[in-house]
C-alpha cells in the first residue's frame, strides 16, 4: 500500500560484501549443510533447461562482483539501516521459521524437485566421489 513503491523493483540485501562461499559457510554452520562446487557447464546440463538465459544467469552470478544498494528500500519505507539483519542472522531467522512450518517446506517436495535431486545425487556419485 505504499504509493512510493508502485511500479518499482527492489532488491533486498546487505552491504556486507559477502561471497557465495561466505553464504555457504553460514549454511554449514547453522544447518550442517555440505557443499561441493561444480563446474557451471555441469550444473547447466543437470539442473536447468540449459538455455542461453540460464547460461547468462550462471555467468553473471559466478563472474560479476556485484553489490546490493538497499538505500532505495530505506528511502521508500523510511526504515533505518539498523532494522535490517545481517545475512547470517537472516539465514538463522529463516531456518528457525521454516523449522516451525514443515507445511511450507513440503511445498518444495515436488516430482520435479525429486527428479533434480536424483540427477544431482548421480552426478556426485560419478564425478565428485569417483
Image (spheres, rainbow, N blue to C red):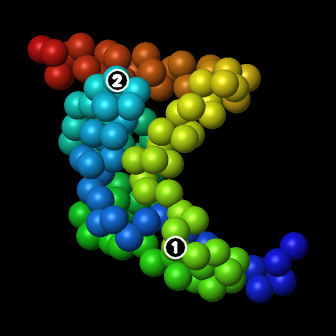
Tell me how many marks there are.
Answer: 2
Disc 2, SS: loop
Residue 43 image offset from top left, x and y in percent: 32, 39
Q: Is residue 98 above or below residue 40?
A: above
Residue 128 image offset from top left, x and y in percent: 17, 22
Residue 110 sits in quarter: top right
Disc 1, SS: helix
Measure the alpha-carbon separation of dots 1 and 2: 30 Å
Tell me the residue at 35%/55% (across/down): 58
Q: Is the C terminus in the top left, top right, bottom left or bottom right quadrant?
A: top left
Residue 62 image offset from top left, x and y in percent: 27, 57
Q: Which residue is mark 2?
A: 32
Q: Is residue 9 left or right of residue 32?
A: right
Q: Is residue 63 above or below residue 81?
A: above
Tell me the residue at 62%/30% (across/down): 98
Q: Is residue 8 left or right of residue 54?
A: right
Mark closer to the chain start, 1 or 2: 2
Q: Which residue is mark 1?
A: 81
Viewer can see residue 41: no
Amino acid at each position: 500500500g505504499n504509493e512510493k513503491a508502485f511500479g518499482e523493483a527492489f532488491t533486498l540485501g546487505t552491504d556486507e560484501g559477502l561471497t557465495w562461499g561466505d553464504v555457504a559457510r553460514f549454511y554449514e554452520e547453522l544447518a550442517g549443510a555440505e557443499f561441493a562446487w561444480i563446474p557451471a557447464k555441469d550444473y547447466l546440463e543437470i539442473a536447468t533447461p540449459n538455455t542461453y538465459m540460464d547460461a547468462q544467469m550462471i555467468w553473471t552470478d559466478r563472474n560479476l562482483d556485484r553489490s546490493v544498494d538497499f538505500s532505495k528500500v530505506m528511502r521508500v519505507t523510511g526504515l533505518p539501516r539498523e532494522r535490517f539483519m545481517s545475512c547470517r542472522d537472516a539465514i538463522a531467522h529463516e531456518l528457525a521459521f521454516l523449522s516451525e512450518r514443515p507445511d511450507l517446506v513440503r511445498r518444495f517436495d515436488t516430482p520435479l524437485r525429486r527428479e533434480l535431486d536424483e540427477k544431482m545425487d548421480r552426478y556426485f556419485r560419478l564425478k565428485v566421489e569417483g
